Amino acid sequence: MAMKKRRYALVIDSRKCINCKACAVACKAENEVPIGNFRNWINEEHQGEYPKLRIDFEPEQCHHCEHPSCVRVCPTGASWQRKDGVVLVAEDDCIGCRYCMIACPYDARYFHEESGTVHKCTFCTHRIDGGVLPACVETCPSKVRVFGDLEDPASRIHELLSTRRHHVKEPQTGNGPQLYYLV
Amino acid sequence: MGTTRMDRRLFLKAAGATAGAATTLQVGCLSYFKKGRSAAADNREVPTTCELCPNKCSAIAVVEKGVVKKLNPNPENPKSRDMLCARGNAAIKQVYDPDRLKQPMIRVGARGEGKWKAVSWDEAFDFAAKKLAEVKAKHGPEGTLWSSTEGFQEVFFKNLGLAFGSPNLVRHPTLCLASVNLAYSATFGTVPSFDLLNSKFVIMSGANRFESIITPDTMDLIGGVMERKAKLVYLDPRFTVTAAKADEWYPIKPGTDLAFILAMIHVIIKENRHSKDFVAAYTTGFDQLAEHVKPYTPEWAEKETEIPAKDIVRIAREFSDAAPRALYYAGRRSSWYQNDFQMRRAQAILNAIVGNWDQVGGMVPNAKLPKGEFLFMPWDEPKAPRVDEIDKHFPLAAKGDGVYLKLRENVLSGKPYPVKAWMVYKQDPMNAMPDQAKTLKMIEGMDFIGVIDVQMSDMAWYADVVFPESTYLERTDPVEVMAGIWPAVVYRQQVVKPIHDTKPNLEIVQGLARRLGLADYFDYTIEQWVEAEFKELPIPLAAEHMKKHGVWAASGQPSYGKTLTPDHRFVTKTGKIELFSERLQEAGADPLPVYSAPVPPPSDRFRLILGRVGYFTHANQTNNVWLNEHMKENDLWINPKPAERLGIRSGSIVQVTSSVGTVKLKARVTEEIRPDCVFMLHGFGKKSKMQSLVYNVGASDAVLLETAWDKVSGNAAFHETFVKVANA
Ligand code: SF4
Ligand code: SF4
Ligand code: SF4
């Protein structure tokens, strides 16, 4: 069977986010994330003076960068990138030096006290490899995140990115982040 | 079978070709794999129904080695729209909460002191039965009170109270949505659903739908506002998430929503924008209404509400232009002000005159589905009248639900008769009712208190005996038909065996019934009960289907307009939609909504307002560790202007005082609230030490709230309390 090239990414429609935290709790359960650590979170920005006010919510997690600085700095090769773009940590090889945590411009990694290794969003590879959506994507009441394969022209994310204006966070890092925020 | 789920959960059309797991994905099979999570024989997926809030979303529990690891949304339920909220996801922690009630307990110290003795179920039952019998001997069965809140097993608890002979069952609606239910029933003869999926123009008073999650309304509305260009006008003294997403937000003067609505009706009638055909064919009392709203001009309403008259006029025009795809949304937990019933009535009337009844994008009477009934032995109707004197004071209110605050007043005064035992199921009156000191007094006056709950609520903390109920993931419950625009049947089946010495409510009820000589009335198992219900469901192989899928939805498009036939009789006195209501007049209430201005807070006080966030609705959720980590403590929202005047800074501890209580909590100085209001979140400041994350953390609104209620429905009025705020 010829393997098709894939590039997984997320398109995020932040305006639809209601800060309900379902994504964070779903990830907590799915990936047994310890209390106090998060693989995904909601950035909040409050602006204005009463009664002219504004709140923006912005879901964030690992950007599964095209050129991941975390992978570059890892001395053991524990941080690595799959062919489909997903950035992972091979637990067995991780020595817990935390260089990657410093190198990540998006602060997407945390140190897992119990295992002594660094953890992060895996795009729920155990789910997506079976064709099931990541937990945070699936559970969201407003379906803020759209997950898919950029290489698949029939995918919804492909369609969204070709029809809607969007941006990535801090492109100047040169990391080539793969969370696309619709504007 | 299971195809909806496959289509919606799968993101890769071609995945089946490369990943074997995808092709086998279906309900009842393990659908995904993980390092360390093999597809071992003891791994299961069990469809069930969430119980963390009253929405009843469909969930699929993933069980590994007998432990619930994950709850995934079940897309087959149209109501839950393929999602589980944070609370739903966190239900796992309800099961594995170290603070959980793990065995029956009898109080040994003083009430509320927290000294308990773990006992056997027999001991707990014997003890409670003896106490209940003593009270019955002395005061009759009416000397016992049975409090409960919405839940699939609530029926067994209520039946025990009735079989025992007590007329005094009291439920949550008058602390929640009684005024909405009564107002819509009085107008349309039924309480409709709101078709937010198809509406083009929505107005909301409070009903903070993006933080108080109601399915499918929350999801349909966010889609409507963000994708389908529906317009949302939102009135709230606080800049909530809903306000932030709305097209227009008005920080309305609290308690004046009725003025806004009356002025809208005024504009619509004056400009001849109402739906003449609809009004003529289906309503009664239009002429009286037209006369009635004449003085309620937009200019008058501007003074009351602080919403500019020109905006009221414009909103009224846009609303009627968008009709019938336009809605004044009713909301739930409508217990705010003493005019709440009339405010909801006015909404209903406004909706009616633009003809959005039974229309796409309008209000839709709920479609229902038949369900079988288990026939149990009937008991004699309780003889005594209700202690809350509902017939005399609230003749229109729902008898079976009772009127909570009036009931507490009467129990405290011992009139019309003494009530000396209090049984509670799944409810926390200590936090659900305003004026906690009064509730404590009521507790003190009881000879006996028994509480059935999954956790040591504040109410349980003051009980004499606590019966630990199994959590929803550990039980099988009765079948529930969810009426609505997209009606569905849901089923909750046991996912894992109880991990502690707990029982489902039915077995607790049976244990008590046996000792009270009432065993014959409860002579069945949950399986028999459920089987009987399955029988009449319009589902082929219902039992099998429900066990495998957990939900069944009527297929096809919702049907609109069924009631729009010339011979349709609405369930009202006249058979019409009653703009003017003779029934209300006869009951001594205003037949058309009459406005009276709310009393403003004195200059040294603030109006205390309440609300929710998306991850806590009920007081029992703040101690869930997965939810608690998103907010560990509540605080008092105060606008910078008064905060500056009072020298209050964000993070400083303030003392908040009402006429009935005082609390201390941190201040949050924020632009996101009117200067004359302060706000706090519900569910903190617990008294129970077995709510360890929130015990004595932050403050409970119930301590501050004063006793006040809506005159017609008896609904508690939670926003009628003024407080003083000062640095502590
Ligand atoms: S993709 Fe999976 S691991 Fe990553 S944030 Fe979402 S739920 Fe967590
Ligand atoms: S689940 Fe969706 S709406 Fe809720 S916080 Fe996460 S992204 Fe936002
Ligand atoms: S809305 Fe959330 S808590 Fe309520 S039933 Fe649905 S998933 Fe459960």
Image: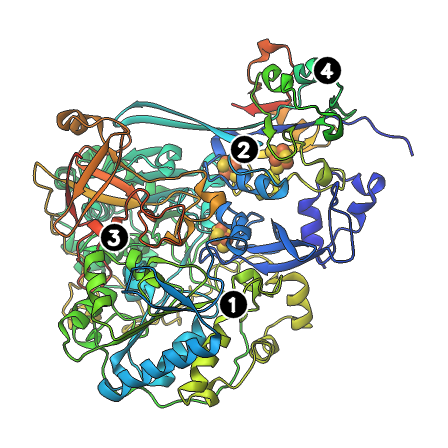
Marks 4 and 3 sit apart, C-alpha to C-alpha, by 56 Å
- Labels 1, 3: front one: 1
Q: Are marks 1 and 3 on the same chain?
A: yes
Q: Quadrant of residue B2?
A: bottom right
Q: Position of residue B57 (x, y in %)?
A: 53, 55
Q: Which mark is residue A37?
A: 2
Question: Which secondary structure, mark 4?
Answer: loop
Is label 3 in contact with label 2 (beta carbons under 8 Å)? no
Circles 4 and 3 on the same chain:
no
Labels 1 & 4 near each other (Cβ < 8 A):
no
Left or right of B590? Residue A123 is: right
Instruction: Give the quadrant of residue B632.
Output: top left
Circle 1 Cα neighbour tier, 10 Å, few/some/many (<14 / 14–19 / ≥20) = many
Q: Is residue B320 visible?
A: no
Q: Residue at x 29, y 80 (%)?
A: B167
- What residue lies at 57% left-to-right and 63% top-to-bottom? B474
Front one among B338 and B410: B410
Query: Is residue B566 at all visible to an observer of this figure?
Result: yes
Task: Name the amino acid type tagged 1.
Answer: Thr
Against A95, is B634 above or below? below
Q: Mark 1 — residue?
A: B502
User: Where does the N terminus of chain B fall, quadrant-wise?
Assistant: bottom right
| Residue B283 on image: x %, y % | 29, 63
